[in-house]
Each structure stands twice: as structure tokens, then as C-alpha cells.
Image (spheres, rainbow, N blue to C red):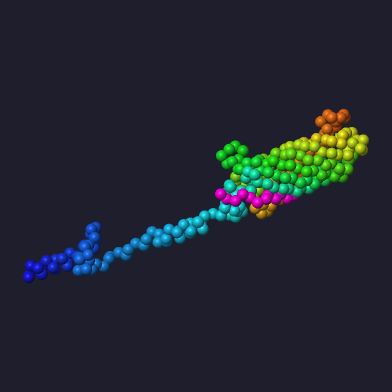
């Protein structure tokens, strides 16, 4: 009996060290010798169910819509300038800087409507990172000072929008093209524009400043050349420079994939 008592006392004294042992206790030892843990159990790394965790992560993802906020987040597939995007513009202004060759004034008040179609998505991995546009332009230019009363015509233009991969709100562009027009200048027996039909060459630079994700304020500085290309002599053309201002609206953008 004395020997059994010594063994029992020894087990009681050595029991706290078992709490730190690496091997777990047997069910019998747990019942006979309850142990109070010295350290609280560490909380689980993530106690949220997998389904709720996925919903939380999805809610924290950046929104795919066009964003003019502090971080200016916009996904390329939801950008204004993507392949197949359509738009329309209305511009007015004044052409009054006469570049000759004849020293005859030829000032006009242009009224222009343009239909746009974006040719390509932004390409940040290429030299020309921006987006190209095809533009069909309808021109009505009443002559307010010069030997004519009206110029009416149409042109096809190619525009390059600079850095549409990063510049979301203010987008600069350059464009060029040409077409044909009708003018009644020949009826005034002037030394310029000797035929009713004349060709148009059109160059311009400008910018779109987006007021919303689809509507932009457009401002442009343009050069126009009118001549009949030698169809009838004398072929003295008109070269004018002037400014345009108006609005451009891009229709419903492509939804995120």
C-alpha cells in the first residue's frame, strides 16, 4: 500500500508537465487528471464560411464602370474607346484666317455633324497606344465674308486618340482626311473657287474633355483647303484656319466580359 501511494503521489506531481507534451493524453488520463491550459487557444485564421468569404471578396473588387474618382479605375473592355464604339458630334465655330494664295477674305461659320466609329482597343504594349477612329463629317459652312454665300459638303477623316489606355477624362487627338463640297462662289465671278464642285482637304488637332462617362466637350483647331483639283482653270483655292467647339456623345459602351 505504501508503494502504491508513492507511485500515485509521483504521478500527481509530474502531471503539469504533461500539458506541454507533444503527444495527446489518452481519454482515461484526461478523465483522471484534468489540465487547465496555460495559453488560450488561438482563434481560427478565417472563421467565415467559404461562400460568405467569396461574396465579401466579390464586393471588394473594383467596379468595372468608367470611374473618374481618385484612383481612376477603368477596365479596358469597358472603356469609351474600344473597337466598334459609335459616337456622334456637333461642332460650330469660325474659320477666318486666310492663308491665301489670293488676298480675298473668305470667312465662314461652320456647322458640322460627325459620326464616329472606333477602329481598335487601346494598345498599351505598342508604340501607338491609343485608338483610331473613322469619321464621316457633314459640313454646312455659310460664308459671312467673301465671294460666296454657302459651302456644303462631306468628308471622311481618320483620327488618332492619344493614350486612351491611361488618359480617361482628357483625350487629345489628331486627324486628317478629305472629301467634296458644293459652293456658289463661281456665280460671283471671283478669282477663287471657279467651279461649283470643289475638293476638301481637312487637318485638325483637338481634345475631348469628358463631362460624363459618355458625353465630352470637344474643342478643335482646323485647317481647310478648297480647290477643284485642276478640273477647270483658273484653279485658285481657298486655305482657311479656324476653331471649332461642340459636344461629342458616345453611345452605350461595351459591358464587361
Residue at the image position 64 percent from the left and 46 percent from the top: 81
Task: Give the percent coordinates (x, y) of residue 132.
Answer: 66, 40
Residue at the image position 58 percent from the left and 47 percent from the top: 76
Residue 145 or 177: which is nearer the viewer?
Answer: 177
Q: Is residue 76 left or right of residue 205?
A: left
Task: Give the percent coordinates (x, y) of residue 190.
Answer: 91, 35
Task: Give the percent coordinates (x, y) of residue 92.
Answer: 78, 48
Residue at the image position 69 percent from the left and 47 percent from the top: 87
Q: Is residue 126 left or right of residue 25?
A: right
Quarter of the image where one finds residue 206: top right
Q: Tell me where the magenta segment starts and ends, as one range.
A: 246-257
**Magenta span has 254?**
yes
Number of marks:
0
Residue at the image position 71 percent from the left and 42 percent from the top: 135
Q: Can residue 22 be seen?
A: yes
- Above/below status of 5 relative to 108: below
Amino acid at each position: 500500500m505504501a508503494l502504491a501511494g508513492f507511485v500515485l503521489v509521483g504521478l500527481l506531481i509530474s502531471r503539469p508537465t504533461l500539458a506541454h507534451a507533444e503527444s495527446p493524453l489518452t481519454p482515461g488520463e484526461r478523465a483522471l487528471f484534468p489540465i487547465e491550459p496555460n495559453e488560450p487557444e488561438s482563434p481560427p485564421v478565417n472563421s467565415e464560411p467559404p461562400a460568405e468569404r467569396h461574396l465579401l471578396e466579390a464586393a471588394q473588387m473594383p467596379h468595372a464602370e468608367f470611374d473618374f474618382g481618385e484612383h481612376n479605375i477603368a477596365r479596358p473592355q469597358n472603356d469609351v474607346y474600344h473597337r466598334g464604339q459609335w459616337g456622334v458630334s456637333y461642332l460650330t465655330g469660325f474659320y477666318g484666317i486666310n492663308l491665301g494664295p489670293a488676298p480675298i477674305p473668305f470667312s465662314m461659320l461652320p456647322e458640322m455633324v460627325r459620326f464616329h466609329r472606333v477602329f481598335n482597343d487601346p494598345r498599351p504594349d505598342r508604340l501607338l497606344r491609343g485608338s483610331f477612329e473613322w469619321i464621316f463629317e457633314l459640313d454646312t459652312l455659310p460664308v459671312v465674308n467673301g465671294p460666296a454665300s454657302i459651302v456644303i459638303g462631306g468628308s471622311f477623316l481618320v483620327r488618332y486618340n492619344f493614350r486612351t489606355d491611361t488618359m480617361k477624362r482628357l483625350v487629345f487627338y489628331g486627324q486628317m482626311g478629305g472629301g467634296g463640297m458644293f459652293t456658289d462662289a463661281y456665280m460671283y465671278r471671283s478669282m477663287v473657287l471657279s467651279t461649283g464642285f470643289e475638293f476638301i482637304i481637312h487637318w485638325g488637332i483637338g481634345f475631348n474633355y469628358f463631362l460624363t462617362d459618355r458625353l465630352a466637350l470637344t474643342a478643335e483647331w482646323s485647317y481647310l483647303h478648297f480647290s477643284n483639283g485642276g478640273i477647270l482653270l483658273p484653279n485658285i483655292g481657298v486655305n482657311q484656319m479656324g476653331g471649332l467647339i461642340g459636344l461629342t456623345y458616345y453611345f452605350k459602351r461595351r459591358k464587361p466580359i
